[in-house]
């Protein structure tokens, strides 16, 4: 079975500071991993995905995530937060025909 | 239109009403999904259609009835809903998959309020 755990339902960072959103996964098969972003009153938008081609995955809007099998983690980072990054972020895992989302992390960016 | 569209964007209905939510994808995908997003709860997968056949129904109450007439359209028919059904209903699409490596693309959602 697959599952994801997002550590921290709320994260606040100052504008220009590092963004780190944590995601740990559980999977009985090699996983496919995704990060999505949801802005208020909108659907989910794909930020990036890991499909075993490279452990460091670059996405849109300056985000990237690193797959670490030994730590079963897929944390999302961005070197410098921008006000427009304020949103809800979801980690997801898929495998064996199933797709599971985490509970989400709300990112606040402080001017 | 591009991507995944959903109508209406907002819906207020009484518990005795019957309404339908519509989803259309313009991406050439052949799998479509309905999700329910409630405040402070994880996304709940409600229905999956792959190649126009329902492949998953996660114990959703019968007051929700999906319909997928073709690979581009998906409906969610609603009747005799309860206040706890108030939520954001999201539609998504992807390529049909055995290994689930294909990402899902989401519509903007329908904000449903049951009074």
Image (spheres, helix red, strand yellow):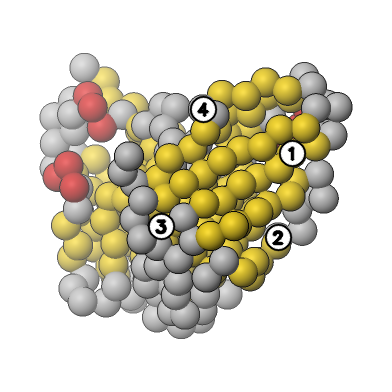
- Chain letter belonging to callout 3: B
Foreground label between 1 and 2:
1
Tell me, yes or no, whether dots 2 and 4 are on the same chain: yes
Count residues near mark 3 (Cα–Cα under 10 Å), then give few for <14, some for 14-19, many for 20+: many
* Label 1 vs 2, first from the N-terminus: 2
Q: Which residue is more in the foreground, B50 or A6?
A: B50
- Residue A48, position as x, y percentages in the image: 26, 56
- Residue tagged by mark 3? B104
Vertical comparison of B99 with A48: above or below: below
Q: What's the mark number on residue B58?
A: 2
Name the image quarter holding the N terminus of chain A.
bottom right
Residues B67 and A70: in front is B67
Distance in Å between CA atoms under marks 4 and 3 = 20 Å
Mark carried by residue B9: 4
* Disc 1 + disc 2, Cβ < 8 Å: no
Q: Secondary structure at mark 2?
A: loop
Q: Residue at x 40, y 45 (%)?
A: B4
Which element carries disc 1, helix, strand or loop?
Answer: strand
> Residue visible at 39% across and 37% down?
A38
Q: Which residue corresponds to mark 1?
A: B78
Going from N to C along the chain, the mark reached first, 3 or 2, is: 2
Nearer the observer: mark 4 or 3; the answer is: 4
Question: Do badges 4 and 3 share one subunit?
Answer: yes
Is residue A72 visible in the rendered image? The answer is no
Between the residue at mark 3 and the residue at mark 2, the CA separation in whole angstroms equals: 18 Å
């Amino acid at each position: 079975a697959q599952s994801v755990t997002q550590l921290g339902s709320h994260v606040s960072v100052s504008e220009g500071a590092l963004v780190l959103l944590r995601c740990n996964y559980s999977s009985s098969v090699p996983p496919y991993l995704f990060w999505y972003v949801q802005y208020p009153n909108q659907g989910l938008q794909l930020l990036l995905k890991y499909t075993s081609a490279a452990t460091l995955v670059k996405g849109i809007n300056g985000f990237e995530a690193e797959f670490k099998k030994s730590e079963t983690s897929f944390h999302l980072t961005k070197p410098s937060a921008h006000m427009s990054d304020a949103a809800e972020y979801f980690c997801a895992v898929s495998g064996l025909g199933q797709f599971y989302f985490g509970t989400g992390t709300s990112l606040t960016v402080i001017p | 239109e591009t991507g995944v569209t959903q109508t209406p964007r907002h819906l207020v209905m009484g518990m005795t009403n019957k309404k339908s939510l519509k989803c259309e994808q313009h991406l050439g995908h052949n799998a479509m999904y309905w999700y329910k997003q409630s405040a402070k709860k994880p996304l709940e997968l409600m229905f999956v259609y792959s190649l126009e056949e329902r492949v998953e129904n996660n114990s959703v109450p019968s007051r929700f009835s999906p319909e997928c007439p073709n690979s581009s359209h998906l409906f969610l028919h609603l009747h005799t809903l309860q206040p706890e059904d108030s939520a954001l209903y999201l539609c998504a699409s992807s390529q049909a998959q055995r290994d689930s490596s294909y990402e899902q693309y989401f519509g903007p959602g329908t904000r449903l309020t049951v009074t």
